[in-house]
Amino acid sequence: MFGYVRAYKPELKIKEYEIYKAVYCSLCKKLGKSYGILSRFTLSYDFTFLALLNMSLSDECDCYEQKRCAFNPLKKCNYCKNDSGIDMPAAAAMIMLYYKILDNIADERGIKKIGYWCLKPIFSSAHKKAAIKYPLIESAVSEYIKAQNELEKADCSSIDEAADPTAKVMEKILSLCSEDENQKRVLSRMGYCLGRYIYLLDAAVDLPQDIKSKSYNVFKNKATDDINEYVKITVTPQLYFCVNEAARAFELLDIKKHKSILGNIIYLGLEETFKKELNSK
């Protein structure tokens, strides 16, 4: 994942920020405990959001305790005592990472390709462990990578078609956050919109580099000489549409806790993130 689904920290209350950090640290700890210390480096805010969402739909108590950080023993961090809501996001992160490594092996050349070949056996057993626990995520991610590769090989120029695999994999992953069929439908819609948002933003951010390296980018053949103007006119409205639709779905969810933090991410964080990312490029 890309870290594009994150909170707008200046608008979080101190208590909310501490919970947000605690979930982030708990996910880091879970990755290390379940899949090895190197898996901690795969942590992103996207999976922190997924963990918060998964926890928010449960009635279980999220008690917290202080323990020392694995990377900085002099520092104490808050961790969730009950990490059942973090198990699925941790597995999703591991499965996504493994397929990203495979994808990079196919795409990269030279030293980078060798580097990813070296990473593959390191994360292979962790991937198998996660895939056994969550076969639905394994199936969804493998289908997503296959579909995305086929579209790239065909040099797909349709924005809707190119964004569809990422949107669908997020749709399936978010739907696992609830057993209730009505909530699953809402989560699926929210996941689809967030997946589309992630794909479009990542493609827009990578556009200058992809043009230079002649790599695939769905916007590459459409962009004019003024890339900034193209992104402003074409991509930004689509990002706003994804954010607004995700917000509509969010309002239909039966959120039991952490609603203010999730609301911060949906209503403020998504827009602030894409503005920041696009402006920086």
Image: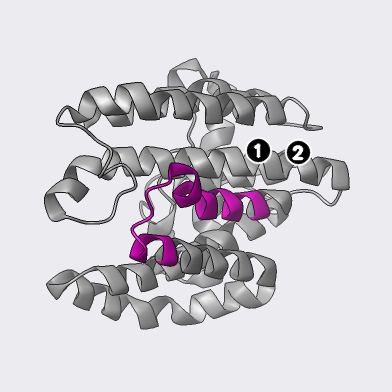
Quadrant assignment for the C terminus: top left
Residue 254 point in image, percent of width and height = 81, 32
Residue 108 point in image, percent of width and height = 22, 68
Amino acid type at circle 1 is Met
Residue 204 point in image, percent of width and height = 31, 38
Where does label 2 land, which residue? 186
Q: In which quarter of the image is residue 111?
A: bottom left
Disc 2 crowd rating (10 Å Cα; few below 14, some 14-19, many 20+) is many
The front one of 5 and 279 is 279
The front one of 268 and 40 is 268
Q: Is residue 155 visible?
A: yes
Type of secondary structure dominating the magenta stretch: helix
**Residue 219 part of the magenta segment:** no
Q: In the rendered structure, which segment of residues is drawn in magenta?
A: 150-172
Where does label 1 land, which residue? 190
Dots 2 and 1: beta carbons under 8 Å? yes
Q: Can residue 58 be seen in this view?
A: no
| Residue appearing at x 32%, y 22% in the figure | 232
For residue 104, above or below residue 209: below
Image colouring = one colour
The front one of 86 and 182 is 182
| Residue appearing at x 73%, y 25% in the figure | 251
For residue 153, above or below residue 57: below
| Residue appearing at x 36%, y 69% in the figure | 103
| Residue appearing at x 58%, y 23% in the figure | 244
Residue 12 point in image, percent of width and height = 52, 20
Distance from disc 2 to disc 1, alpha carbons, whole Å, reads 6 Å
